[in-house]
């Protein structure tokens, strides 16, 4: 099982560390050929407009769109999730349009409004998950095939659509590996049991 992590901008290194702790091999994706031989792809948090421009320059927009559209596993966090949405509220910003969701960018305000909150995510068990929100988006519209996995304060912050897992918060910035593990399990990996 090799996980490709888009590494153009943002917190890709934190995802790499989380997967390493789960025993999964990772490769940093900066060119289309780096996607050869990967089993799953991760789009990290960062700045969605910057990542988009760099994806275009690197020739990665098409390959990533094909990847997600053909039902291969993709984990996208924060800016990554924004890039997957079919539209962004009130903004004419291009996206990959691979997930049937709309998002609102910077839904919680500016950097100083960033916060942490315990999240109830039934797919991860009873123990609350530490949600790290940094200039995070919210999902404002979910298509009919999109599963809502977590709400915080009445707003949708984690969804799944087939093999796509999209989070508004940053699971890679906590010690809790359950969301990365859930993704690996969905990819068919058998990872050692973890105790977060
Ligand atoms: N606010 C950023 C954006 O709109 C996302 C922030 C993040 O990924 N932490 O792209």
Image: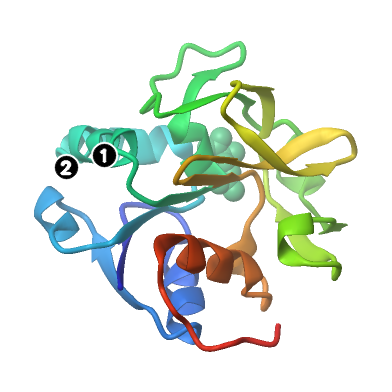
Q: Is mark 2 within 8 Å of ligand 1?
A: no
User: From the viewer's perspective, is residue 170 above or below residue 95?
Assistant: below
Question: Relative to the observer, which residue lies in front, 147 or 179?
Answer: 147
Looking at the image, residue 158 sits to the left or right of residue 56; the answer is: right
Q: Percent x, y for residue 139?
A: 67, 30
Q: Quadrant of the C terminus?
A: bottom right
Q: Is mark 1 within 8 Å of ligand 1?
A: no
Q: Locate residue 116: give its quadrant.
A: bottom right
Residue tagged 1: 55
Is the residue under label 2 in contact with that under label 1 (CB below 8 Å)? Answer: yes
What number is the disc on residue 58?
2
Looking at the image, residue 179 sits to the left or right of residue 196; the answer is: left
* Farthest-out residue, left: 33
User: From the viewer's perspective, is residue 14 above or below residue 44?
Assistant: below
Looking at the image, residue 144 sits to the left or right of residue 97; the answer is: right
Ligand 1, by image quadrant, is top right
Q: Residue at x 16, y 42 (%)?
A: 58
Q: Are there few (<14), some (14-19), or many (20+) residues within 10 Å of tag 2?
A: few
Q: Percent x, y for residue 40?
A: 33, 58
How many numbered badges does the structure rendering display? 2
Looking at the image, residue 97 sits to the left or right of residue 18; the answer is: left
Q: Quadrant of the N terminus?
A: bottom left
Question: Relative to the observer, which residue lies in front, 107 or 153?
Answer: 153
């Amino acid at each position: 099982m090799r996980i490709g992590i888009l590494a153009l901008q943002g917190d890709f290194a934190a995802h790499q560390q989380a997967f390493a702790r789960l025993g999964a091999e990772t490769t940093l994706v900066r060119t289309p050929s780096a996607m050869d031989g990967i089993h799953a792809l991760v789009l990290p948090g960062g700045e969605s407009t910057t990542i988009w421009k760099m994806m275009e320059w690197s020739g990665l927009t098409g390959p990533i769109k094909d990847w997600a559209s053909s039902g291969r596993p993709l984990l996208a966090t924060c800016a990554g999730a924004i890039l997957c949405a079919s539209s962004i509220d009130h903004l004419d910003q291009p996206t990959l349009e691979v997930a049937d969701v709309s998002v609102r960018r910077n839904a919680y305000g500016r950097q100083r409004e960033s916060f942490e909150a315990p999240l109830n995510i039934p797919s991860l068990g009873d123990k609350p998950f530490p949600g790290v929100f940094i200039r995070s988006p919210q999902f404002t519209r979910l298509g009919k095939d999109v599963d809502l996995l977590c709400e915080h304060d009445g707003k949708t912050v984690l969804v799944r659509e087939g093999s796509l897992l999209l989070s508004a918060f940053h699971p890679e910035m906590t010690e809790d590996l359950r969301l990365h593990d859930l993704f690996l399990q969905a990819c068919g990996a058998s990872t050692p049991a973890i105790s977060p």
